[in-house]
Amino acid sequence: MGSAGTELNMDAVNKTKHQLFGYLAAHLVSANLLIGEKLGLIALLMDAESAKGITLAELAEKAQIKNVRLLKEWALCLLSNGFLAYTPGDTEDDDLYYMPKEVGVFFARDGGPFSGAWPFVSSMTSLPPVIDVMITKYKDGTGINWGDLPEPIVQAVADFFQPVYTHLLPTWIRTLHPAVSSKFGQPITVIDVGCGTGHS
């Protein structure tokens, strides 16, 4: 039953409910990923992949975390969302956790083709101050300037695209602009016109 006696399409209601909770879950998972990064857990679990895992007690000791129970809740959140894997032990305390290498490529700081996603995720903590700015812009109609964004987001956008420029741009140029590509290796002058931090 909707407001003013109107009937609700419960299929549509349930669809919206699942969509909304999906967004909320993504927010919580992102927060846990950021917590893991700041505590050094992500790096430790990436290293544990080659050894086929590490117990939560060992992980807590290496990361200097005293609350193993809370660490378990953190690990189970990422495990259930596909960011971690584990090898069952004789007991739950013996379970070995690790981050699969196919996941770890997104969190590595090695300049690889997939490494740009993580800085963008970590910058999400800078969004709340932007909300008030956006509300003001909506009301006064002045528009949102690039300079209104906090520095972590500006840098994250740059870091997000840097692997693309490094690994894909040369291929794009060779394919789309053979005349320009033919000049590579020769002394040429290039004018880079645009915004950003200089990665392009």
Image (cartoon, rainbow, N blue to C red):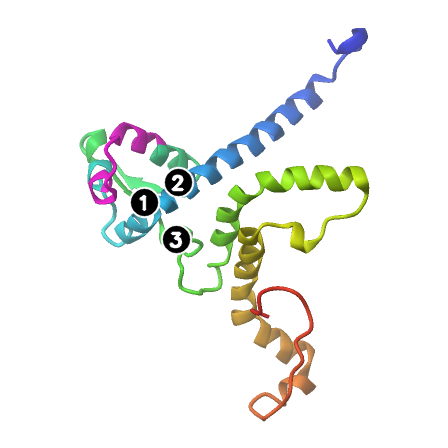
Q: Distance of mark 3 from mark 2, alpha carbons? A: 16 Å
In what element is the residue under mark 3?
A: helix
Which image quarter holds the N terminus?
Answer: top right
Which range is magenta? Answer: 59-73
Q: Is residue 95 above or below residue 143?
A: above
Residue for badge 1: 41
Residue 64 in picture, x, y percent from top left: 23, 40
Which image quarter holds the C terminus?
Answer: bottom right
Q: Nearer the viewer's eye, disc 3 or disc 2?
A: 2
In what element is the residue under mark 2?
A: helix
Q: Quadrant of residue 34?
A: top left
Q: How many marks?
A: 3
Q: Distance of mark 3 from mark 1, alpha carbons? A: 12 Å
What number is the disc on residue 33?
A: none
Q: Magenta: predominant secondary structure element?
A: helix
What number is the disc on residue 104?
A: 3
Between 25 and 197, the residue placed more toward the observer is: 197
Q: What kind of residue is marked 3?
A: Gly
Residue for badge 2: 35
